[in-house]
Image (cartoon, grey):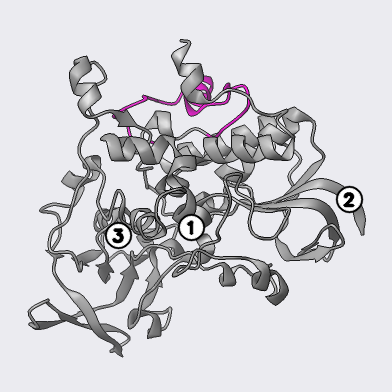
Amino acid sequence: MSDAVEVAIVGAGPYGLSLAAHLRKAGVSFRQFGLPMQLWRDFMPEGMFLKSQGFASNLSDPDHTHTLEAFCKATGRPYADYGLPVPLDTFVAYGQWFRAELVPDIDEVLVTGIARAGDGFEVTLATSEQVRARKVVVAIGVEPFAYVPEPLSALPASVCTHASAHTDLGVFKGQEVIVVGAGQSALESAALLHEKGASVKLAARENVIRWNGVPLALDRPLLQRLREPESGLGSGWATWFYSNHPGAFRHLPRSTRVYRARTALGPAGASWLRSRVEGQFPTLTGLSVAWARMQDGGARLGLTTEGGAQRELAADHVLAGTGYRTDMTRLPFFGEQMLAGLRKVPGTGSSAVDRDYQTSVPGLYVMGPAVAQTMGPVMRFVFGSEHAATTVARQLTGGRAAGRSRTAVAATR
């Protein structure tokens, strides 16, 4: 049994790295477990771009020095606050640089168990080591929550996989692939498959494919900026609210929070992706998958319209760009006892948290996508790491790690 630490951080993606940077600066005793930037390295396809703008793709550090812009400047990579999509490999390299500079002492091992132990917790690692911690922060990404709906989920992985299962879509060169979905993941996966030599069809339940607007000009007249402000998640007052005020979002009625967390900003594709989709391959809209079965070593899908019309499609492989659904029971490190004490947002699998991201289990905190139904859709984006990391760090240090928000820093420039 290892000596007790004040905090154990589970996860080493943008949220976990950001919190660790704040705690390290504040002198808090902590250990962090996980594989740095694993979601981005192992569950996203090569050639992908982030949907967020450059200025909204920063991890959070207490001095606001280790931004994506600073990394790109130090390494000679192109960067712009607006209008220049951030390549996946640039963002992964940025996360690794942030880790090396600010939180070098990560234990690159997975957590297999978290249980109450006295007035704290016992964290079990894949190495069988057990660590005592007074508090635990779960800062995982979406990788445990990949969602493949029925009837696609009944197909074997040889003919149907979630979009997150592939880092190299070039393996489908020369094959016929049906991509199911209408969000950024489905649209970009379909574009990459087409560009890598696959014969692609996109099937979507939505009647039209929606696209986000192009970034608004930074030098717009003041009145235009007041009418439609630009923020970390996009333009408009609603988006500005989601981006900048997670603490206020949690006070909205539960049904509103759940709905907005699920529907805000999508399903839709980024403006820069549109030319790589429209006119490049067939996009079939207004169709739901009614049934799916194996056929001749591939898959055959039965599709229906709202009016009941039917059609069938066959392919070598089906790629489900169907997103993620939070379900805390899918986290392998929570046993029945912990899950029994963990209050969820009714009607969802998402953990309920208070204003400081603390769950109904005292001393257990959750931050990131798993709390979007409480703190809002910003938790699904890197931009949310600023609020989450500064809030949790402030709580864990009794205010010593308060710092200044990036909004306040920007106002002084």
Mark 3 against mark 2, which lies toward the viewer? 2
Disc 2 residue crowd, few under 14, some 14–19, many 20+, Cα 10 Å: some
Across and down, in percent, residue 31 comes to 78, 46
- Residue at the disc numbered 1: 43
Query: What amino acid is labelled 2 in the image?
Result: Ala
- x then y, percent, for residue 214: 21, 35
Question: Are circles 1 and 3 on residues that touch, CB within 8 Å?
Answer: no
Q: Which amino acid does label 1 sit on?
A: Phe
Q: What stretch is highlighted in magenta?
A: 59-86
Residue lying at 18% horizontally and 46% vertically, measured from the top left: 274
Tell me if 60 is positioned left or right of 45 in this view.
right
Q: Name the residue under label 3.
A: 186
- Looking at the picture, tell me which residue is in the foreground, 413 or 35: 413
CA gap, disc 1 and disc 3: 14 Å
Dominant secondary structure (helix, strand or loop) of the stretch shown in magenta: loop
Which of the two discs, 2 and 1, labels the residue nearer the N terminus?
A: 2
Residue 137 drawn above or below residue 385: below
Is label 3 in contact with label 2 (beta carbons under 8 Å)?
no
For the N terminus, the quadrant is bottom right
Q: Distance between the residues labelled 3 and 2?
A: 44 Å
Residue 322 locus on image (x, y percent): 34, 66
Magenta span has 150?
A: no
Looking at the image, is 291 positioned above or below residue 102?
A: below
